[in-house]
Amino acid sequence: MSRAATLVSRALALALLAAVLAALALLVVLPLAQHWTSLGERRAEAARLAARFHAMAESRDSRAARLAAVTEGMLEAGLYLEAESRALAAARMQEMVADTVARHGGEIRSIRVVPGGEEELEAGRVALDVAMHGQWSELFAILHALESGEPQFFVRSFTISAREQRRPGVAEAVPTIQLGFEIYGHLPPEVSG
């Protein structure tokens, strides 16, 4: 073999070696480097999330303590219905609503307990459907007394209609307002939960 052929074969061997090394770099080393970089980014994201969840877990105790303090304050302020069960709370609530309506000159037509769904049961909500009638001035006083008293009640779902009614001993017909509404209160967490 001549010297030129030897040089050409060495050059080809070196070129082939360079091509194999380049192919090895492109097919193995570069993907491994990219995967390594991706793993580093994922590790950093996982560490950031772990730190965030750790901080949330630490703050959970303080939030639970704040919630307990708020609940205790609401108990002391008398904002919850006081009863040992949902049925007793509903009966007590019916009595309180009937007394408030009568004290302000209204007249109850009906009061019934609204059956609670799963969400109401979890929230400790006790609701009544009330139908009553009275004069405008009485209705305002009744609604104000119900929503501003203790325990705390919330009125919603109004139905209002008016009709004239003759009262004994009064010459003129007096407009009477028919009012239907839903009213609800809440049980303390230890009773509702």
Image: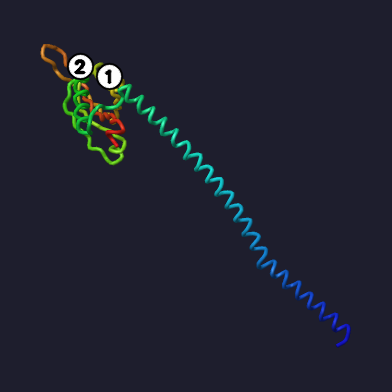
**Amino acid of disc 1:** Ala
Tell me how many marks there are. Answer: 2
Q: What residue is shown at x 81% (from left), y 81% (from top)? A: 9
Q: What residue is shown at x 38% (from left), y 30% (from top)? A: 68
First in sequence, mark 1 or 2: give its number: 2
Mark 2 surroundings: few (<14), some (14-19) or many (≥20) residues within 10 A: few
Viewer-proximal residue, 51 or 124? 51
* Quarter the N terminus occupies: bottom right
Q: Position of residue 76 (x, y in %)?
A: 32, 22
Q: What residue is shown at x 67% (from left), y 63% (from top)? A: 30
**Amino acid of disc 2:** Arg
Q: What residue is shown at x 35% (from left), y 26% (from top)? A: 72
Structural distance between the alpha carbons of marks 1 and 2: 10 Å
The quadrant in which residue 175 appears is: top left
| Label 2: element kind | helix
Q: How is the image coloured?
A: rainbow
Q: Position of residue 11 (x, y in %)?
A: 82, 77
Residue 145 circle label? 1
Vertical arrangement, residue 52 with respect to residue 173, above or below: below
Mark 1 surroundings: few (<14), some (14-19) or many (≥20) residues within 10 A: some
Residue 103 circle label? 2
